[in-house]
Amino acid sequence: MIFFISDLHLSPRSPGATRLFRDFLAGRAREGEALYILGDLFESWIGDDDCGDAFNAEIIGALRGASEAGLSIGVQHGNRDFLLGDGFAAAAGIRLLPDPYVLSTPEWQFVLSHGDFLCLEDTEYMAFRRQVRSPEWQAAFLAKPLAERRAIAASMRAQSEQGKQEKAPYLMDLHPGETEDFLRQHGYATFIHGHTHRPATHDHIVDGIHVERWVLADWHEDRGECLAWDGEALHRETLG
Ligand code: LP5
Ligand code: MN
């Protein structure tokens, strides 16, 4: 069994989702051989020098426990935790994966992504993304004290939530044409992504070929979701 999850947005303000994730890592996830976390595991990540924070250490310990029990864990960056780096990966016993990432199993091909890079009509976000993903911005940010970084992240989160209320829904979804190009470029593999918080299974017809796109659900205080591949089919499992 291979599991896929995304958009948990864990923070000290989400004790319910944190508990669901810890229970998942200690239980159901260990019945599989691999877990892929497709971005936004954390509500925000301000640098690997914050691994020692009590909440972060709790999540890192839970990941490490599952990893040491034999679960292979791959993590992609989301738009809120793209600063996760090698220090986090080593402490948690996980592998950081590029976005997109092609997953080939003996039975099937998948392409995995957080999904935000295809939201091309949200031009404000794309500009913001280019800026915060640039090495110069990241170096300047990481040079600031943790407390200042925490305050900046909180301010960005508040502005983002405010801004989303004024954006048309189509802006915050994947660009249809670019998505089909992406599916073509990846050999019509089954596409799994998160980010939009609009769980659904889409059927695309690209060059006459049927391609599935599975959108993962975001997690809530009382409910999480994972997608499971059993070698034959994908199915959604509710957690909690
Ligand atoms: O995350 P979500 O779901 O709310 O919305 C996203 C897009 N928003 C973001 C911003 C993140 O939420 C903030 C993450 C902060 C943690 C990282 C800290 C590290 C910083 C490192 C710097 C090098 O990604 C949102 C999309 C939405 O998805 C749907 O796709 O619309 O896009 C935006 O909100 C971007 C805005 O449109 C424009 C930018 C405003 C940001 C203000 C920056 C000002 C800096 C403040 C300094 C005090
Ligand atoms: Mn996201």
Image (spheres, rainbow, N blue to C red):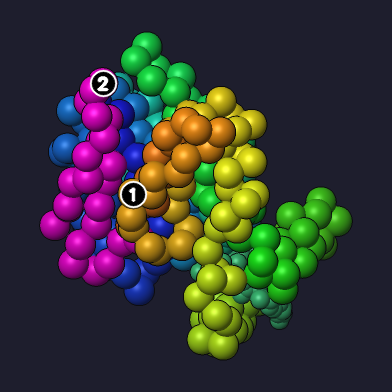
- Specify start and end residues of the magenta stretch as a single range: 218-240
> What's the CA distance linking mark 1 and mark 2?
18 Å
Q: Nearer the viewer, residue 16 or 186?
A: 186
Q: Are marks 1 and 2 in contact (CB under 8 Å)?
A: no
Q: Is 64 above or below relative to 203?
A: above
As shown in the figure, which amino acid type bears the numbered disc 2?
A: Gly
Amino acid type at image mark 1 = Thr
Q: Earlier in the sequence, mark 1 or mark 2?
A: 1
Of the pair 159 and 163, the residue shown nearer to us: 163
Q: Quadrant of the N terminus?
A: top left
Residue most extreme to the front? 208
Q: Secondary structure at mark 2?
A: loop
Instruction: Say which residue label 2 marks.
Output: 231
The answer to whether residue 60 is visible is no
Residue at the top extreme of this rendering: 106
Rendering coords of residue 228 (x, y %):
25, 36
Q: Nearer the viewer, residue 14 or 237?
A: 237
Residue 160 higher or lower than 109, as above or below: below
Quarter of the image for the C terminus: give it: bottom left
Crowd rating for badge 1 (residues with CA inside 10 Å; few <14, some 14–19, many 20+): few
Identify the residue under disc 1.
201
Q: Secondary structure at mark 1?
A: strand
Report the side of 46 relative to 140 (left or right): left
